[in-house]
Amino acid sequence: MAKLNTTTPSGFPEFSPAEQRVVRHWKKTIAEIFEKHGFPLIETPLVERTENFEAKGGNPKEIYVLDRLHSDSADQDSAKSRAIRFDHTVPLALFVARNFNDLAFPFRRSVIGPVMRGERAQKGRFRQFDQCDIDVIGNGSLSLANDAQMVVIIAEIFAKLMPEQKFVIRINNRKILTGIANFLGIEPRKYLEVIDQKDKVSADKHKQMLKELCPDEDQMKMFFEKGFKDKNFNESWGKGKIEECFNILKNSFGELNEECLQGINEMEEVCKILFKNFGISHLNCIFDYKIARGLDYYTGTVYETNLLNEDGSINTSLGSICSGGRYDDLAGVFTGKDLPGVGISIGLTRLLWQLFDAKIIEPKQSSSSEAIILFRSPELLSKAIKIGQKLREKNIAIENYFEPKKIQKQFAYADKMGIPVRVIVGEKDIVVENRGNSEELKAKIEAIL
Amino acid sequence: MAKLNTTTPSGFPEFSPAEQRVVRHWKKTIAEIFEKHGFPLIETPLVERTENFEAKGGNPKEIYVLDRLHSDSADQDSAKSRAIRFDHTVPLALFVARNFNDLAFPFRRSVIGPVMRGERAQKGRFRQFDQCDIDVIGNGSLSLANDAQMVVIIAEIFAKLMPEQKFVIRINNRKILTGIANFLGIEPRKYLEVIDQKDKVSADKHKQMLKELCPDEDQMKMFFEKGFKDKNFNESWGKGKIEECFNILKNSFGELNEECLQGINEMEEVCKILFKNFGISHLNCIFDYKIARGLDYYTGTVYETNLLNEDGSINTSLGSICSGGRYDDLAGVFTGKDLPGVGISIGLTRLLWQLFDAKIIEPKQSSSSEAIILFRSPELLSKAIKIGQKLREKNIAIENYFEPKKIQKQFAYADKMGIPVRVIVGEKDIVVENRGNSEELKAKIEAIL
């Protein structure tokens, strides 16, 4: 028999045992924060009718469909009519369409789970990856407070998961950009795409792109430097003087057209709620005219989130770690109804892969337990099991070592798993050792024993 | 344009908004109990090389493979060479093979997630469903304490999730059955299959099956009534006299052959650890010779779990809600190594579907929040948001209603979501109402405000 190739297929990643613990911690924390803000986890099938993905603009080249190993032409599963989700937004739209009458609006949901895209597999790009999304969908209208809430949730997640790491949430409003484009007589979509490339291509290359877009260099310059780059604008923001900032923007762009003004007004409203009511620091959230999310379907507020280097500059090698925005029309194609929404998404698999790769996170422990019970000789196993049960009844996550091996082998297991606290059951005594930073747990265990 | 069919594809289920909350609660609870006992969550890809599934005996008719919507023959993803997992056991074997040198043995892992099988879709049978599995894998050997631990974990899960519901875990050891079959000169596999049908077909039908298997009716009867059905056996078990039980079995079957005796000895050891060390009630766990798991690859201990009717009889309409067993050879085909294991699996999607269908669980609330903040007039929204932030900072999961709607509309939302506690922000006062059983949360909120 030919030797089997047991490696993972290209683009279908698997984290190492120690990395898995970080994945679990992140998912658990993200889910808890989503829920704390009123976004229940809702799971939809991995598989939907292909036609529904096509209707919502999935890239047909990247869509995976189901087939049977032994095809049976009578079965719908074998005719490319069943496709695997490539994001969580289309399944959300379908869920809303299917459950419309049972839902209370605004409808909030979170989801943490895999999607698949047939991208060209390359370093750090995967064909299966987890996305963590939240969205809130209004029936006919949706308050801008929801746009502000997204920033609050992003900030809470990264402050909790990476307390030592500085980050910034950059926000903008698409209407300001499309308003400027329309004023300049440039196709808005093209304008957004060029703006979007600002941090992604070289300065020279970007200059060239701008020039092609708007041959009148002075005019284009004005729209990059006026207002957005106004020294007073940045100073006012730094001091949290939100009204002053937006007065500067209104003076610069507000009179261009109705669209621009509306974008500025929306942004101002979002920022007031964000800074004054939610109490978010203006240092964690900045206005950035370069945030366009060019390839997406957003129509209002847009978000990107970046880690900061030690000098306060943006870590560009990682890209945005959490993005999203407001969209006017979630499920019109499915429901015929006006359902505006706003949402954000964390590309978890890619993000964690990058954080491991850059050694920003270095996983050490592969066990889920902080503590383990070892025993000095085989006849002490029953005593060790009883102690384990007693501790677990007090809700301590502690595993029992069960194999009749020498104590050195048991220690080697605990070391390899990275379990810091060891309860060692001897004939005459029980010793609790802490080889990590778990003094508190050690004391807790000692108090129970 | 033809109207789109937005329903879920046949066999790919979706729970209702209120049911989703139960799904989340079950998954969260199961994961926490798995981890508490030392089984970290490990996620493997949904997709593996098809050859590896075939090598481990997947039913080829049920295996789903990937294809691209726009096939590109140069890509491996379009040649039936990538298949979607049909269980969590083969992916576990592959994970162990891939990470062998990085793992500490015994290696424990849990997994909660979807698998796909191309079964004929029918009521309560799905093509995509979640399974919750744990397994522990030894390198060369694995203590029987691990077999006992599985029962402890099953018991803890169902006691926590369905505290009012009585259940029983039925255990057996395959070696006893195959020993008897070999003694009788019956093909063990056929014997196991017939035993397995005992509770699944009519008494007459089963009698007929037994007759075909072993034409000597007296002989067959003896092996069903001797020992297993011994009055003293059942009485001793009821009184927790495990040694007495196993002496009866040894007298009945122990001398048939070595295999039988080994099975009885293993079972006795597991039961001693279970009842004496782990302290499990003998009422929650019974010995049942009819548990065979005929179609699986088990070689020692086997488990099934059933809910009990009010009269203490087994709820046969639901079938086993958690099953598993010990297997000698997890990954020999991939690693060439001797890796014995023991594990259990809960077919979560099917189980919850049945519990909802039978109204054993009746979901009422679709929100993840126990509390919500409402406001009497639009200008009070900013105050309401501040209160929400204050409460969330104290780790209370409370959602804010953001839309500038009349208070009646806000109440209607809270009612539809089933949120029991409402904090109503007025001009001069803040009122906390409890319309459910959440007096404690109400008091906690009042104390913070």
Image: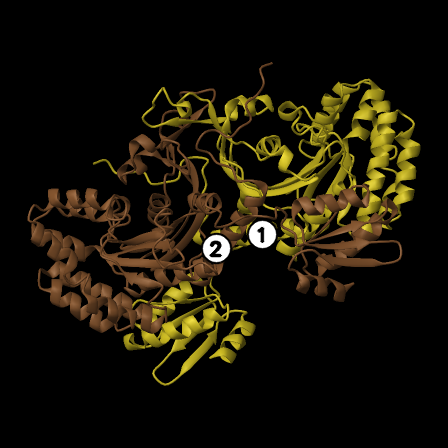
Chain colours: A yellow, B brown
Indicate which disc residue B31 carries. 2
Instruction: Find the distance from the CA under tag 1 to the CA under tag 2.
Output: 27 Å
Image x and y of residue B172, in percent: 25, 58
Check the residue under mark 2 and report the chain it is in: B
Q: Residues within 10 Å of mark 2 (few under 14, many from 20)?
A: many
Residue beneath the point at 50% across and 52% down: B26
Q: Are marks 1 and 2 on the same chain?
A: no
Q: Residues within 10 Å of mark 1 (few under 14, many from 20)?
A: few
Image x and y of residue A189, in percent: 72, 22
Q: Nearer the viewer, residue B48 or B212?
A: B212
Q: Secondary structure at mark 2?
A: helix
Question: Which residue is denoted by mark 1 in the rendering?
Answer: A360
The quadrant where residue B269 appears: bottom left
Indicate which disc residue B411 carries. none
Residue beneath the point at 46% across and 34% down: B12
Can the viewer see residue A167? no
Image x and y of residue B313, in percent: 34, 56
Q: Up-down: is A306 above or below A386?
A: above
Q: Up-down: is A83 above or below B314?
A: above
